[in-house]
Structures are given as C-alpha cells and as structure tokens.
Image (tube, rainbow, N blue to C red):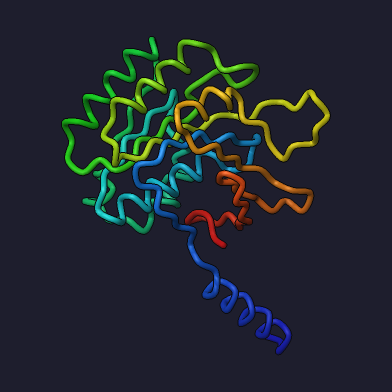
C-alpha cells in the first residue's frame, strides 16, 4: 500500500469522525416537507424516525407502500430488536379520513408516540386535492400537542419563472394552520439542502442518514 493511499484513507476516516448525524428538536411541530424527486424525502423521514426511537419514543409511519427494504435496514442498523419494535407501519389506502381515524386511534392507544410520519400521502403533481388536505389538517388537530407530525410530499413545479429552490404546494393553507414549511432539494453540485422555515442547511446522505 502506497503512502499516498494510506494518507487518503486516514483523511477519509477523519472526515467520517468529524461529520455529525443531523438532529433537531421537533417536539410538537407540524411540518410540511416538500421534496424534489430523488433528494431523499423518505430517507429523511426514516432518519427522523430513528432519532425519535433512540430518544425513547415511538413512531407511526403511514404510506401507500413500505420504504425500500435495503434502505430501511441501513437506517435502522443502529437500533436493536426492542427499539425497532417501536416503529409501526400503517397503510395509506382508501379514504383518507378513515386512515386518519386509524392513525389517531393508534397515537392515543400506544405509549410514548412521539412522531407521526405520512409519506407520499397526496397526489404527486398539481395542487393538493381538497380531501387529503382537509384530512391531514384534521390529523394535526387531533393528535397530542407534543406529538410531531411530518408530512412528506413531492415539491410542486415552478411555472412562474421565479427560480425558487423548491415549491411548497398548498403553502398558504398549511401556513394558516400553523405548519412549518420546509423543503428538501439539491443544488448544481448535488449537495442536498434542508430549508426549515428559511433556515437552510447542507447535508451529505450516507447509509445511516443525514450528516452535516
């Protein structure tokens, strides 16, 4: 092994050691996260789920399909079997209001639910339809005030020429209900950015989640 190769390996190890796994206190927040395609929206949701479980809480995850099994196992590798059992997956199939009823019932009956995630919960393009929008706003009002609600949906298309980094669909409706408006997008250098109410932070996505 050459000295140059050894040096590059050492530098890589130092960079990994210095990188910190992203964490933020989201207690009680209602978040609408708009995601550009392929920027890691589901990964971000699973990252937040692992953070919640590691802090002793429980997670309800609702989506039409389960996350990719390989990606799921990578992100949950740091959890033991008991911890992983505090992740509860629910299907978002059928009438949205009935799905919300099931989520609320689970959130009230299970102990220490700290995070509810809805992934791909609405139509992927165009304005969010009235029924699912009303259902998630109802959900936000019915779960416990200290429980975090994270809604993950695809970013809208900018047709105004404003060159926004991302477009949050139904933004005014969510703002009226007190939601935090957030976006996940990549720049020209393929660095992923999280815009949390105007506070922008860059990330590197690794097997175990988001690192800063």
For residue 124, what is the image quadrant? top right
Residue that appears at 31% across and 35% down: 60
For residue 38, what is the image quadrant? top right
Residue 75 versus residue 121: which sits nearer the camera?
Answer: 121
Residue that appears at 25% across and 40% down: 113
Residue 139 horizontal/vertical position (percent): 35, 24
Residue 6 drawn above or below residue 92: below
* Tally of marks: 0
The answer to whether residue 133 is left or right of residue 56 is: right
Residue 191 drawn above or below residue 20: above
Q: Quadrant of the C terminus?
A: bottom right
The answer to whether residue 109 is left or right of residue 44 is: left
Q: Quadrant of the N terminus?
A: bottom right
The answer to whether residue 149 is left or right of residue 39 is: left
Q: Is residue 87 visible?
A: no
Residue 100 horizontal/vertical position (percent): 33, 20
Residue 192 drawn above or below residue 142: below
Taking the view exactly as shown, the residue that stands out farthest to the bottom is 3
Residue 74 horizontal/vertical position (percent): 45, 52
Residue that appears at 69% across and 46% down: 186
Taking the view exactly as shown, the residue that stands out farthest to the front is 176
Residue that appears at 39% across and 14% down: 96
Q: Is residue 40 visible?
A: yes
Residue 30 horizontal/vertical position (percent): 42, 36
Residue 43 versus residue 6: which sits nearer the camera?
Answer: 43
């Amino acid at each position: 092994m050459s000295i140059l190769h050894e040096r590059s390996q050492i530098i890589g190890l130092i960079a990994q050691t210095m990188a910190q796994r992203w964490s933020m206190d989201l207690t009680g927040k209602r978040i609408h996260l708009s995601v550009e395609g392929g920027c890691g929206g589901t990964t971000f949701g699973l990252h937040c789920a692992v953070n919640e479980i590691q802090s002793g809480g429980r997670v309800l995850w609702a989506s039409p399909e389960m996350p990719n099994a390989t990606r799921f196992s990578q992100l949950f590798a740091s959890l033991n079997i008991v911890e992983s059992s505090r992740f509860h997956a629910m299907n978002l199939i059928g009438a949205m209001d009935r799905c919300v009823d099931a989520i609320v019932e689970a959130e009230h009956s299970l102990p220490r639910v700290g995070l509810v995630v809805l992934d791909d919960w609405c139509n992927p393009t165009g304005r969010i339809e009235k029924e699912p929008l009303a259902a998630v706003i109802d959900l936000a009002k019915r779960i416990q005030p200290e429980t975090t609600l994270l809604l993950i949906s695809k970013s809208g298309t900018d047709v105004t020429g404003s060159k926004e980094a991302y477009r949050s669909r139904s933004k005014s409706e969510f703002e009226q209900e007190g939601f935090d408006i957030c976006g996940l997008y990549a720049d020209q250098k393929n660095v992923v950015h999280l815009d949390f109410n105007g506070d922008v932070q860059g990330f590197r996505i690794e097997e175990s989640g988001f690192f800063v």
